[in-house]
Amino acid sequence: MSGRLEHQPPIQLVIDSSMATHKDHRSSRPPPPAVTSKRPLSSILARLHAGYFRISISLGGQALLWKILSQPSNDLPQDTNTLLHIFHSAAHLILWCISLSILISLSFLYLLRCYFHFHLVKAEFSHHVGINYLFAPWTSWLILLQSAPILVCPKTVLYLVLWWLFAVPIMALDVKIYGQWFTSEKRFLSMAANATSQISVLGNLVGARVAAEMGWRETAVCMFSLGMAHYLVLFVTLYQRLSGSNRLPAMLRPVFFLFFAVPSMASLAWSSISGSYDTASKMLFSLSLFLFTSLACRPNLFKNSMRKFNVAWWAYSFPLTFLALASAEYAEEVKGNVALGLMVALSGLSILVFLGLMLFTVLNVTKLLRENDPILSFAKDPTA
């Protein structure tokens, strides 16, 4: 009996590897779709910062350009003038409706972002680049108000109420950001200045032009002087290449076009305030034309930012549109072949860039909300 037990083979425990692998494979499966159904909207709201309102600014600017082009010209025959007026008016109305729908959609999504991701909005408010784009939504609405069809008259009560609704937040942001520049030891202009800081000036100039169209000349002068005073200081700061100018990522270099967008809008605003395209407006237009030429002669500056599509590309569109608008008023005042050719060239370039950006945006709509957007990388600000 004992001999049999000694010669009996030992008992071995065998584990089927296929069963274990199958079990591990099941445990590593992703959760069912019902668990992640709420993630896409949250992801969109988390990535949608105020910089996306550059799209609505560009659309509103194009609508304003086509509105000005739809005005009849005395240099063309009556039949040609009528056909061009119908075409320009139809294009203006279509662009304005598209701009309104997109701006409403962006505003609604950003309101949801403020509600569900307020900590991200707060971080955006504290960011040296992100805070400047908070001017963009209100600037978009003011431009859309200017480019509204003829049914929305600047003399109506509705126009006045809308102006106050969109201009007051700009003034409140002015008190915040401009006050920091000369009072806060950690937010000096030399430390916080970058090319996107000019968006704050642009909002003041757009508001001044709308106020001048309503007949509120003193209010328009106030907003114009506030914007231009800070633009001069900001221009000198960026021109000297102080520490703040080196803190802009290469992806955001298209915002360098704001250098000529501000004097272009300033020439339009001052023309509305003074009632004519006088010498001051011509000087501002000449400055914007020079700055545009300087940037256009240096395409290597934007080479790194053009490798992959980004919403920052829309910073090419609305500065060109504002320059084309200024050239249209300049051509209307000067009445010469050179001024007319300049207006046609700049308007055509603005329209081509706008159409190209629309095409690139449609083709890259899945890449529009980027995870590596520099505005979303809310690392601790060195000036905070």
Image (cartoon, rainbow, N blue to C red):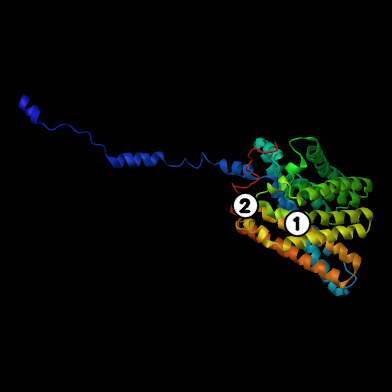
Secondary structure at numbered mark 1:
helix
Going by the numbered disc 1, the residue's amino acid type is Phe
Quarter containing the C terminus: top right
Does the image show residue 141? no
- The residue carrying mark 2 is 368
The residue type indicated by label 2 comes to Leu
CA distance for labels 1 and 2: 18 Å
In the displayed structure image, the side of residue 72 where residue 62 appears, left or right: left
Asked whether the beta carbons under mark 1 and mark 2 sit within 8 Å of each other, the answer is no
Q: Image quarter for residue 348?
A: bottom right
Disc 2 packing (10 Å; few <14; some 14–19; many ≥20): some
Which is more toward the observer, 13 or 285?
Answer: 285
- Decide which of tag 1 and tag 2 comes sooner along the chain: 1
Label total for image: 2
Q: What residue is shown at x 92% (from left), y 53% (from top)? A: 273
Q: Which residue is drawn at 76% across and 57% down?
A: 319
State the residue position of label 1.
Answer: 318
Is residue 23 at all visible to an observer of this figure?
yes
- Which of these two is toward me, 354 or 302? 302
Observer-nearest of 286 and 189? 189
Provide residue 331's location: percent of width, then percent of height: 87, 66
Residue at image point 88% right, 73% down: 78
Q: What element carries label 2?
A: loop
Provide residue 337's location: percent of width, then percent of height: 86, 72
Residue 191: image x %, image y %? Answer: 73, 42
In front: label 1 or label 2: 1
| Number of residues whose C-alpha sits closer than 10 Å to that of mark 1, classed few (under 14), some (14–19) or many (20 or more) | many
